[in-house]
Amino acid sequence: MDIFKAGEVRIKYITLNNDTIKRSADRKVGRAFLYVYMYILAILKNRTILYKPYKRRRGKALRMYGFCNSVRFRRLCYNIHITNKWRRITMLGAIIGDIVGSRFEWDNYKAKDFEFLTNDCFFTDDSVMSLALCEALLESKPDFSDLREQAVAKMRAFGDAYPDAGYGRTFSCWLYFGDPQPYNSYGNGSAMRVSGVVYAANTMEQVKQLSLMVTDVTHNHPEGIKGAEATAVAAFMAKQGADMQAIRDYIDANYYPMDFTLDGIRDSYMFNETCQNTVPQALMAFFESTSYEDAIRNAISIGGDSDTLAAITGAVAECYYGIPQKLREQSMSYLDERLLGVLRAFEEKYPPKIAEL
C-alpha cells in the first residue's frame, strides 16, 4: 500500500499502553516539506489504531497522534523518516520462495541476476504442505491439543488434492498408503512447511511446541525436528522484532554453527534434501541479505534444492523485512482458489500486521 510519494517513514520508538516497540535503521528524509495528511488503519497489539501525522519544519520529527475508535488514545511522539511502502507480515514468505525456486530445483543457477517471477514458476509440495498445516492450525482446538491429528488429516487431504506437487518417495507412501506413522525422517520437508506455527504461537516456548507437533507426525528423527524448530524459532524471533545478529547468535548457540559464508560454499554446495545440509544454508541466505528479495536470491544462488532452500529462507525473511505489496499480489496469482482460500482464512484468523518497509 503506497502511503507517501517521497521518502520513507522510519519509526524508532512507539510507546503504546506502556509497551515500547523498537525499530532500527535510518533513512534519509527528502528535502521537500512534508505536506501530508494520512489515515492508516492498522492492527497493532490487536487494537485498531488510527494514525494522523502533522507536518513540521523541514528535517524535524513529525508528531503523530494515535486514536483508538475515533477517541484520542495516547499521544505518540517519536522520530521518524518518511516512507512510501509498508509491508504485510503473512504466510506468503515461504510460498514465494517456493514459487521462485521451483524452476531452479533441477536446473541450478548459481548467481543472483535472474528474473524473479516468470511464467515458468509454479507452486510445489512446499507450498501445498505449508498451507495444509495452516488449515490444520485453523481447525485445531483453541489449545491445539489435537494439532497432530489435524496435521495428519490435512496433509493427506491436500496430498489427495495435489498428487503431482512433487513429493518425495517416502513421504508419498505416508500420504497415500496405509496407517500414516512417523518414519524417522530428517528430510528438509519438515522445515519447508513449518512457518504457519510462527503466526499461531504467542511465545518462544509455544512456537517450539507447535513446531514439534506438526513435525514429528512424519519427521521424528532428532535432525528433522531440529531443522523445523530452528526455522520456526528464527522466524518467530524476527516477527517479534529481534535484530538479525541476535537471531544469528541464537541459532549458532542452539542449533547450527553459523561459521561459513555463501561465497565460501557456493562452488561446492550440491543438491541435498536433509535438514542438516539445507536449513543452515537457508538461514545463512537470510543472514547475508539486505531485503526479502535479496534473501531469496541468496538462497537460489547456492544451488541445491532451490525451492525448499528459498521457502525456508523466505519464511524467516518475510518476518524480518516484510514483502512489498506488488510482489505479494504478483505471487498470489500463482495459487489456485483452494490454496488462496486457505491463505485468506489464515490471514483472517491471524491478521496481517502492517509495518514499514
Image (cartoon, rainbow, N blue to C red):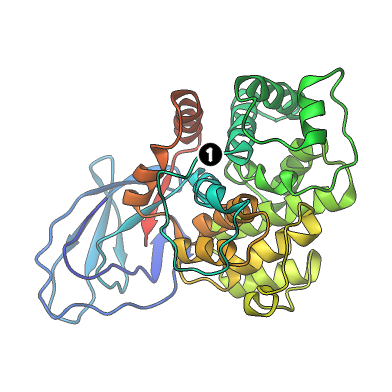
Answer whether residue 141 is visible to the viewer in this image. no
In the displayed structure, 227 sits above or below 146; it is below
Q: Position of residue 131 (x, y in %)?
A: 58, 33
> Taking 215 as reference, is 291 left or right?
left
Q: Residue at x 62, y 51 (%)?
A: 105
User: Image point 51% across, 43% down: which residue?
Assistant: 91
Q: Foreground residue, 241 or 4?
A: 4
Q: Is residue 121 left or right of residue 28?
A: right
Residue displayed at 79% across by 63% down: 255
| Residue that carries the numbered disc 1 in the rendered image | 123
Indicate the position of residue 51 as horizontal and vertical percent values. 25, 53
Q: Secondary structure at mark 1?
A: loop
Residue 296 locus on image (x, y percent): 52, 60
Q: Amino acid at mark 1?
A: Phe
Observer-nearest residue: 234 or 263? Answer: 263
The total number of labels drawn is: 1
**Residue 41 at x, y percent in the picture:** 28, 45
Q: Nearer the viewer, residue 141 or 306?
A: 306
Q: Is residue 338 left or right of residue 236?
A: left
Which quadrant of the rendered structure holds the C terminus? Answer: bottom left
Q: Is residue 228 visible?
A: yes
- Mark 1 neighbour density, 10 Å: few (under 14) some (14–19) many (20 or more): many
Q: Nearer the viewer, residue 233 or 215?
A: 215
Q: Residue furthest top?
A: 178
